[in-house]
Amino acid sequence: MRIGFDISPIAPGRTGIGQFCYYLLKGLMDLESGDEFFGFSSGRSRPDLSDLRPHVSGYHMPVPTRVLYRVWSAVGRPRVDRWLGGVDVYHATNFFLPPTASAPRVLSLYDLSFLVRPALCSPKIVGPFSRGVPRFAQAADAIAACSEATKRDIVERLGIAPDKVTVTYGAVADGFGPLDPEQVRGAVTARYGLEAPFLLFVGTLEPRKNVVGLLKAFAAVSHRIPHTLALVGPSGWGTGPIMKALRPLEAQGRVVRIGYLRGHEELAWLYAAARAFVFPSFYEGFGLPVLEALTCGCPVVTSKVSSLPEVAGDAAVYVDPEDVDSIADGILRIAEDDGLRQSLSERGLVQARQFSWRRCAETTMGIYRRVARC
């Protein structure tokens, strides 16, 4: 089978969707099914396929992706499968469904936050995605959703038949796993100035992640615990209220901003050295940082909404993200109860083993064969 695949997200410094696409492709190749993979990309930067070749060949269109999307939306041409020399199925991995001449199309949808919680999303995303994604979902031959929660949103919000949507859970990147906290704490202190004990948050600093709620909850209990709060991740949109809540805690030395970490090794150190991972997000299509924490044996406090209970199972303290007092109580429980942390760490390692790229690849390949009838 000849499989077309949008590899545009596999850019240098890839995050989120780029990581998913990269590891899914690697998983598909590891199946050794004899199928051929043909990647399509657009934009100024070519995807980094250095360790995917020669199994994946790439066709790059050096025009801005937004321009290409506008052309496709306006005239429905050129057909992407013809650029690839003809394929049996095309996988649209980045929310946009391009036109094909004959190849059936699979569309990946990672979340519907722009419809479910539009006030928490950048206006630059809400408008175009709200108009385009429902149309693409109807036109696709099959949809790959990253969680049961996202599948429910697709069925209920977009009116898609349940049997058209298959859940393809992702997994963590290479490099995450249990480490001895005592062996990494020195490196964490030397690199970031973080002394034990500390709590950890990983994610983009933006409204959907409920960073303001986290900071308010931490401020409310900070006089009762000695912990520092470490924030790992880039700044996103709508950071004004976040910065306002952050400044006094930074001035007191109780919050440390680390920013975006490109490599996984240092992030794994932080998960291992942290007393707990706290992630009270309002909405997640999957919640990869939670799975990373579980994989590293880091106890988790997270929200009891959207996909997060699917990922964390019985290995987390759950809080109401709409209630600062609930988040504060979760922080206190995890900070003060050694037995609870140990139990969650052990359960987390078991829970994390349910997620693998091989399983994701096998499920995805099943979608390809079904729609391509191969």
Image (cartoon, rainbow, N blue to C red):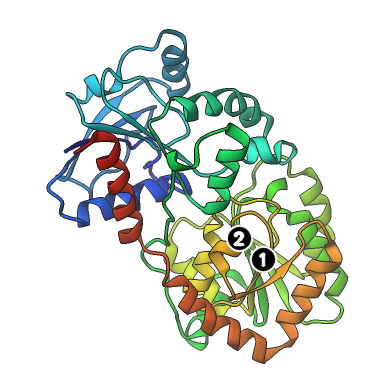
Q: Which residue is mark 1?
A: 302
Q: Quadrant of residue 271?
A: bottom right
Distance (Cα) linking label 1 and label 2: 7 Å
Point out residue 300 in the picture as x, y percentages from the top left corner.
62, 73
Q: Which residue is mark 2?
A: 308
Q: Give me the residue at 30% from left, 60% from top.
A: 358
Q: How many marks?
A: 2
Q: Is residue 218 visible?
A: no
Q: 201 and 170: which one is in front?
A: 170
Count residues near mark 2 (Cα–Cα under 10 Å), then give few for <14, some for 14-19, many for 20+: many
Q: Give me the residue at 63% from left, 41% from top.
A: 113
Quarter of the image containing the C terminus? top left
Quarter of the image containing the N terminus? top left
Q: Quadrant of residue 253?
A: bottom right
Q: Quadrant of residue 333?
A: bottom right
Point out residue 264 in the picture as x, y percentages from the top left corner.
43, 63
Instruction: Assess whether mark 2 and mark 1 are in contact (beta carbons under 8 angstroms).
Output: yes
Q: Amino acid at mark 1?
A: Thr
Q: Is residue 39 left or right of residue 245?
A: left
> Callout 1: helix, strand or loop?
strand
Q: 95 and 227: which one is in front?
A: 95
Residue placed furthest toward the top: 75
Point out residue 210 in the picture as x, y percentages from the top left corner.
73, 54
> Callout 2: helix, strand or loop?
helix
Q: Amino acid at mark 2?
A: Leu
Q: Give me the residue at 48% from left, 30% from top.
A: 137
Q: 341 and 252: which one is in front?
A: 341
Q: Give me the residue at 49% from left, 42% from top.
A: 162
Count residues near mark 1 (Cα–Cα under 10 Å), then give few for <14, some for 14-19, many for 20+: many
